[in-house]
Image: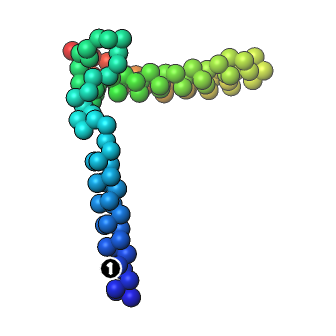
Amino acid sequence: MYAGAAGMALVAVVVVAGCYLVHRAVVVAREPLLVLPFQSGWRPEEHALSRYHVRWYLATLLFLAFDVEMLFMYPWSVVVAELGATAVVEMFVFLAGVLAAVVWAWREGALRWV
């Protein structure tokens, strides 16, 4: 049983090494990060793998939170006349939660761009 496992491991190593060697033999550009992308003939101003600043991720999350808020408000505006005062109270409770999130984000400095 041990010889079978060792044989399978050897076959796996040989297959992976073979795939790697075939790739290295037929690859078109050996240095893909040095090849310039086609961008209307302009040279790129930054590296292709440059990272965004972390504040953009936070801004994106805030945008998504308020976008989802609007998803809740549109159906509410359609049925508010049917449901009456309870719908208005529920929406104000929801908006109070959203306001609490905005105040927290503001205090944490999420809306500061300096």
Near mark 1 (Cα within 10 A), the count class, few <14, some 14-19 or many ≥20, is: few
| Residue in the foreground of this view, choosing between 98 and 51 | 51
Does the rendering let one see residue 106?
A: no
| Residue in the foreground of this view, choosing between 30 and 79 | 30
**Which element carries disc 1, helix, strand or loop?**
helix
Q: Quadrant of the N terminus?
A: bottom left
- What's the residue at 35%, 15% (across, down)? 39
Lateral position of residue 18 relative to residue 34, left or right:
right
Residue highlighted by disc 1:
6
Does the rendering let one see residue 68?
A: yes
- What's the residue at 27%, 23% (across, down)? 36
Q: Quadrant of residue 69?
A: top right
* Badge 1 amino acid: Ala
Q: Quadrant of the C terminus?
A: top left
Give percent across and percent down for residue 31. 23, 35
- What's the residue at 33%, 73% (across, down)? 9
| Residue in the foreground of this view, choosing between 107 and 36 | 36
